[in-house]
Every structure is written in C-alpha cells, then in structure tokens.
Amino acid sequence: VETVYRKGNVKETNYYYYDTQNRMTDIVKYSYIAKRLLPETVFEYNESGQLFKRTDFTPGKSDYQNWLFKYDANGLKTEEHCYLKGNMFRGKLIYKYGFEKD
C-alpha cells in the first residue's frame, strides 16, 4: 500500500498485488470520488514467467490500452504492440540488439 499526501491530506492510495511467484499482477487505486477501488494496471505473464500483456486503464473513463510483448529465444523483448480498447491498433515498438565480442 502506498499513500500519497498533499498539504497533510490524503491525495491517493495505491495498492500493489503480487502472485505466488512474487510478480506484480495488479496496481489498484482507491477512488475517493467513486468510493471504491479501481484498477489502474493489470499484468499477465506467459508460461516462461515473462510479461506478455499489460492493460492500462484511464481513471474515470471506459478507456484502456493493451500492451502485448514478444520475446526472442534469449528472453530479450523484441516487440511491443499497443491496442486501444483491446482491438484498435495504436502502434508498436521494435527492439534490435547488438552484441560485441571481446
């Protein structure tokens, strides 16, 4: 739990949830307007334990973004794809790595 104060008053309260492998699964904020916990970010992992999907929610709106991650055989991230509301393609990042031999 993380509580943020501003001028002595509670500004926001964040909760962090973890699975049995100690990987973060959810970030949740308490909404003082809605008077309940609202999801901010949800993390999902593949069979290899790598993050394969991150969902970011927009507070107070029905908007969200899904980030999908791909990895190479060495476990290095090779791509990130972003979709709005789950299916509208927004963009992608491609990673290229170079290795130097001594």
Image: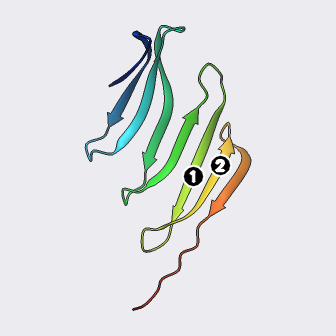
Q: In terms of image quadrants, where is residue 59?
A: top right
* Residue toward you, 24 or 1: 1
Which disc, if any, is residue 68? 1
| Residue at image coords 44%, 11% | 7
Tell me the SS state at disc 1: strand
Q: Position of residue 58 (x, y in %)?
A: 61, 28
Which disc, if any, is residue 25? none
Amino acid type at mark 1: Leu
Task: State which quarter of the image contains the C terminus.
Answer: bottom left
Q: Is residue 90 above or below residue 57?
A: below
Rendering colour mode: rainbow
| Residue at image coords 53%, 80% | 98
Name the residue tied to disc 2: 82
Which residue appears farthest toward the bottom when viewing the image? 102
Is the residue marked by circle 1 packed among few (<14), some (14-19), or many (20+) residues within 10 Å? some
Q: Position of residue 96 (x, y in %)?
A: 58, 73
| Residue at image coords 57%, 52% | 68
Q: Is residue 81 above or below residue 14?
A: below
| Residue at image coords 73%, 48% | 89
Task: State which quarter of the image contains the N terminus.
Answer: top left
